[in-house]
Image: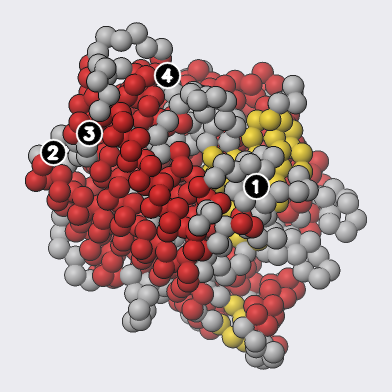
Amino acid sequence: MKNPLLEDFKNEYGIPPFELIKAEHYIPAFKYAIDEHSKEIEKIISDKENPSFENTINALENSGNLLSQVSRVFYNLLSAHSDDELNEIASEISPILSRHNDSISLNQELFKRIEKVYNSDESLNDEQSRLVKVLFDNFKLRGSLLSDKDREVLKSLNERLSKLSLKFNQNTLKETNNFKLLITDHSELEGLPDDLIEIGKKQAESENIDNGWLFKASRENLYPFLTFSSNRSLREKIYKGYVSRGKNKNSENNESHIKNMYALRKEKAKLLGFECHADLALQNSMAESTSNVANLLDQVWEPAKKRAKEETSEMQDLIQKEGNNFKLEPWDWWFYSEKVRKEKYDFSEENMRPFLSLENIRQAAFKTAERLFDIKFIKLSNYPKYHDEVEAFKVLDKKENIVGIFLTDYYVRSSKQGGAWMTSYRDQCKNNGDQYPIIINVCNFPKPTKDKPSLLNFEHAITLFHEFGHALHGLLSNVTYPSLSGTSVPRDFVEFPSQMMENWIRNPEVLDEFALHYETGDKIPSELMNKYLQCQKFNQGFATTEYLAASYLDLAWHTSDKEITEIDNFEKDLFNSIEKPQEIDSRYGSTYFNHIFSGGYSSSYYSYMWSEVLDSSAFEVFEKNGIYDKESGQKLKEFVYASGNSKDLMEQFIKFNGKEPDPKRLLEKRGLA
């Protein structure tokens, strides 16, 4: 069978030929590519020459390209445009890939060759030396020093963890789609914005419901519903639908998967010589140790709680003032915080939405990058796509050379997992000829309606810039070896380039230029802009507390040595121990915490906070020199976005910033100092 996944992607830009790829191509392609990769590894091992950088390290870098090509296409679609057939393929291929990866990372002959290069006095440049160290450390952490017997145990653990992680993710998506809040009485829509009502109508129609409005337990439905619905019982219903995902008594229940992963991760960490999974996961991170992570969280936790209590008091007072006699609950927070903001600042995010069309905000992101980094984005009209909503841009430098290809898939749909992310179909590298990257941003923004473009709330606008920051990290990469390219950096650094970009969309200078009314083209009125600026630090007690609670939860799962029988009790004990306010839930509950149970962020959810320490310190440079200062932009490009993991990351940060990051800047930025 001719298989498009196994051929060179010969269209003009190397984008996968989605229109040719069918579900039946994946399994044969995976099996063939795995076999080819195994042969490439065997060739490295059987080389009779003394191990050298070229015949071992670079040969390893050049191996597995076909498997990478197949995997990137499949797993990107599994997240962005999934169906039952792809999920079945994932279940079949996941253990096969796990075994194949272990056959390489636990291969003693291969590790001995890497070790010989690591200990040799071969003359290498700085990037080559770093690559050797990164590979050597990674192989050690994956079990290369274990005995034959223990390596077999580790293979079994990895395979079981891989299956559980995949199942967790599949269950979360199914649970999100399973929940349905159906409203048939128009009066129960009171308070909801017109575009959310239209989304509810479209969602109902897509499930053949003619007379009603349907809302799901996705963040894209949840947050605007909680913010604007006047019906408290419906707010409670959709909120509980969201937070109960993965713990309903059905086939999508994630509780047993979590307990099994908890036990297996502990066993794996002990096997590799660590006290707990967190100690293993934090090796080669910027934080370095569990105690350093806990230290950072503790520094911010008390100021955040103090502010959150003040916010709670303001909302409770408002509830009483309105003649109500109930206690503020988590599903009330968005509704009453919005009321308090309107009362204190005469500002609602809904006032900003007409100025935050998706097209305008993306244009703001592009222009920011163009001014800082001397690049430009040219829209493509003819390219392969897996869904009609995918758009593509050619990214050029000032000499008109292609820097990379940038794809966007922005709109919410049921075949897409929740949240937003950046990933790549191809990474930048130069070790086997220059290869430019192909990067995609996938988000869940509201679709245009019949009479309005996609209008974002401010959180959406920040998300677009955040994911665009990740994309720039991949697009601007300028290193030789793929293992050090782009976002291939420690988890607690990877969020820094993305969070750095958020600073621009929050800046009034950017908003004044690009936030234009979708109908009139008018700028945000100065009065509205001033109101926006006055409430920049509003609700930060809540935002910081719910995030930190999730970070503590992540750390607890990966440092605890208890036998855990009831997940609810485990969470309650933790949150009681840190005195979490009852009115604020953790941003994620265990049973739908995809970041840590299926997204690669186990023991690393803290990294957003760690990275915010970096970005709040780094943006001082632009506050001082001007937000589009060319010299600062070029330094940011050179020392942060272009260098990948080819150099020591803290040294790179200091080269750009001139000093080490200061945690106080984070507290000031959030108004918690």
Amino acid bearing label 2: Leu
* Picture coordinates of residue 663, whole percent (x, y): 43, 34
* Picture coordinates of residue 277, whole percent (x, y): 23, 47
Amino acid bearing label 3: Lys
Earlier residue among tags 3 and 2 = 3
Q: Which mark is residue 127?
A: 4
Q: Can residue 553 be seen in this snapshot?
A: no
Amino acid bearing label 1: Leu
- Disc 3 from disc 4: Cα separation: 20 Å
Earlier residue among tags 1 and 3 = 3
* Picture coordinates of residue 624, whole percent (x, y): 64, 24
Tell me if residue 398 comes above or below residue 286 in the rendering: above
Earlier residue among tags 1 and 2 = 2
Secondary structure of the residue carrying tag 1 is strand
Tell me if residue 230 comes above or below residue 276 in the rendering: below
Secondary structure of the residue carrying tag 2 is loop
Secondary structure of the residue carrying tag 4 is helix
Q: Residue at x 59, y 48 (%)?
A: 16
Cβ–Cβ below 8 Å for labels 1 and 2? no
Crowding around mark 2 (Cα neighbors within 10 Å: few <14, some 14 to 19, many 20+) is some
- Disc 4 from disc 2: Cα separation: 28 Å
> On the image, which quarter does residue 573 sit in?
bottom left
Left/right of residue 248 with respect to residue 175 in the rendered view: left
- Disc 1 from disc 2: Cα separation: 42 Å
Q: Residue at x 30, y 47 (%)?
A: 100
- Disc 3 from disc 2: Cα separation: 9 Å
What residue would you read off at disc 3? 140
What residue would you read off at disc 2? 146
- Disc 1 from disc 4: Cα separation: 29 Å
What residue would you read off at disc 1? 407
Nearer to the camera, 444 or 36: 36
